[in-house]
Image: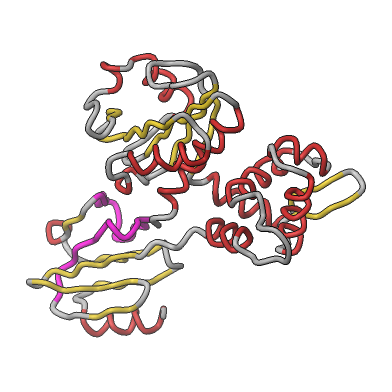
Amino acid sequence: MHRHLRNHVDRNFLHTHVTISNIRNITFNIHLPTNLLTSSGVSVTHSGHSQRILREKESLLKLTSERIAKISPTTIIIIDNTVYIFVEPMPHVFKQVLEKLASEKAPGPSPTFSVLHLLHAIELLSEKTIGRDKLAENLNIGEGAVRTIIERLKNAGLITTSKIGCSLTSKGMKLWKEYTSIAKKVEIGKNELTLAKYNFAILVKNHGNKVKSGIEQRDAAVKTGAKGATTILCKKRRLIIPSASENVAKDFPEAANQIFKLLKPKENDAIIIGSADTSADAEYGTLAAMWTLINDC
């Protein structure tokens, strides 16, 4: 793919060279006057011709040219002498792996755990080695369910087991780091947006554009046992709630203060606050709401 794209560019782009370092990272060596370059979300430096950008498929870079080509997973489309280069995002590996493990068929009754229990198990094991009984207690599931979880995680090479308990492997830790690169979960105190005694908030980086109305996240949380969930977006340095508030800091100041202090949201981040009468229901409800955004990737 590197050679194909480079050859195409050498033939058809006027003094413009493109190389791919991986699916997400593209290095552009641009030998054009900067006034010929326009961009969306990309700054142009005048100190040199080379710049590296990391962007999802919504971002595009415009270059002057006269050809059309498509090289998956990068798409090049030329319209009116302007080249649009789209970089497709990589799928979330942790999502694919955990959903595959959760959906595995096994003899006997259907499992009493979900993909969220697998995710929470990896979170707990990322902090320390935990025995089976303690893991079952922390996950709020029975002995049979935790035994199946351990077996599946071990077979997938994500954990190891010993006399002292279960631990993440390097593969498991890599999966966990991928998840935490886009999501951050915290316990949050009562505020104007919380609905019950126990409350969690989770930030999903750069996924605000995937929120439609917030109803999908609320319904997912309720289905899991929570009282409800509120979805908040960070847009233009301001927190908003779709169809409810254009300025959370003004309408719900305590909630806004907690969100900014604990999660430090940035542009296009989504924040979900889930509430329930038990800590487990609040936590799993918040995770379920978050998963609706990940599922859209």
Q: Position of residue 237 (x, y in %)?
A: 28, 30
Q: Is residue 1 above or below residue 270?
A: below
Occupied quadrant, residue 61: bottom left
Which of 228 and 252 lies nearest the eye of the viewer? 228
Left or right of 219 on screen, residue 97: right
Query: Can residue 62 be found in the magenta stretch?
Result: yes
Q: Is residue 284 above or below residue 71?
A: above
Residue at 24% over, 80% down: 69
Which of 54 and 153 lies nearest the eye of the viewer? 153
Q: Is residue 136 above or below residue 297?
A: above
Left or right of 37 on screen, residue 237: right
Q: Identify the magenta region.
A: 41-65
Which of 228 and 266 lies nearest the eye of the viewer? 228
The quadrant in which the N terminus is found is bottom left
Q: Where is residue 28 in the image (x, y as percent from the top left)?
A: 32, 65
Query: Can residue 160 be found in the magenta stretch?
Result: no
Chief secondary structure of the magenta span? Answer: loop
Occupied quadrant, residue 38: bottom left
Which of 187 and 229 lies nearest the eye of the viewer? 229
Residue at 43% over, 21% down: 194
Q: Where is residue 76 in the image (x, y as percent from the top left)?
A: 25, 73
Identify the colour scheme used: secondary structure
Occupied quadrant, residue 218: top left
Q: Position of residue 129 (x, y in %)?
A: 80, 42
